[in-house]
Amino acid sequence: MSDQSQAFVLHLQSLAESNRGALAALRRSAGFSPGAYPPAFPYVERFVPGDLHAEDSYRLALYVTAALFARNPVHVEGRSMAAALGDLMRERKSDSIEKRFIALLAADADDLPNYLRQIVALLAADGYALDYSNLLNDLSRYLNPFRPDDRDRVRQRWARDFYKQLATSEN
């Protein structure tokens, strides 16, 4: 899945460079359930493996990732969303960021895209980038209803990344 994720992010980056209309459609898709906004189909469906169903977690993760990328189209390999948010909290010294992060960790699969949209908007406002291929892989695990242990592992990794950034500032 990693090669697929990287190919998808490269596709999103090329759209950011050459097709503002595509990014606008992907941004608007965030107001709908993942995969339910037809104008986004041309930019995402070609990356959905043929054997997946409409509710498959990887397909949903592609749409969520595309909408988030369209909001903050700056990709930095190896930088997790949680680490970027931890850096933002360290810089701003704002408890509300930690509260948003904890709400994200507590979110169920249906609400997760809304919480992520708020967090990516915060990161974008301050110029923080993240690794979207990493996020795509995490989301495909988080959104999988048949593997709740994977969801817990993603939450724990996000928590470690976030709090590691805070601990770095304290040392």
Image: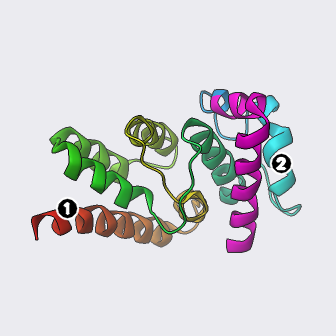
Write down the region rendered in magenta: 1-27
For disc 2, the neighbor class at 10 Å (few under 14, some 14 to 19, many from 20) is some
Question: Which residue is depicted at the point 75% across and 67% down?
Answer: 4
Q: Nearer the viewer, residue 156 or 119?
A: 119
Q: Amino acid at mark 2?
A: Glu
How many other residues sit within 10 Å of disc 1, few (<14), some (14-19) or many (≥20)?
many
Is residue 104 magenta-colored? Answer: no
Q: Residue furthest front?
A: 17
Query: Which dot marks residue 108?
Result: none
| 113 is higher (above) or lower (below) than 37 | below
Q: Is residue 24 above or below residue 56?
A: above
Sequence-wise first label, 2 or 1 = 2
Q: Does residue 29 appear to the left or right of 126 in the view shown?
A: right
Label 1: which secondary element: helix
Residue at 34% x, 51% y: name it. 85
When asked about the image quadrant of residue 132, the answer is bottom right
Say whether residue 162 is visible: yes
Quarter of the rendering containing residue 67: top right
* Dot in front, 2 or 1: 1
Residue 1, visible in the rendered structure: no
Residue corresponding to mark 1: 166
Query: Tag 2's secondary structure?
Result: helix
Count the marks: how many?
2
Which residue, given by chain and number where applicable, does mark 2 sit on?
45
Q: Is residue 26 magenta?
A: yes
- The location of residue 98, given as percent across then percent down, is 23, 47
Left or right of 120: which side holds 24?
right
Q: Nearer the viewer, residue 6 or 13?
A: 13
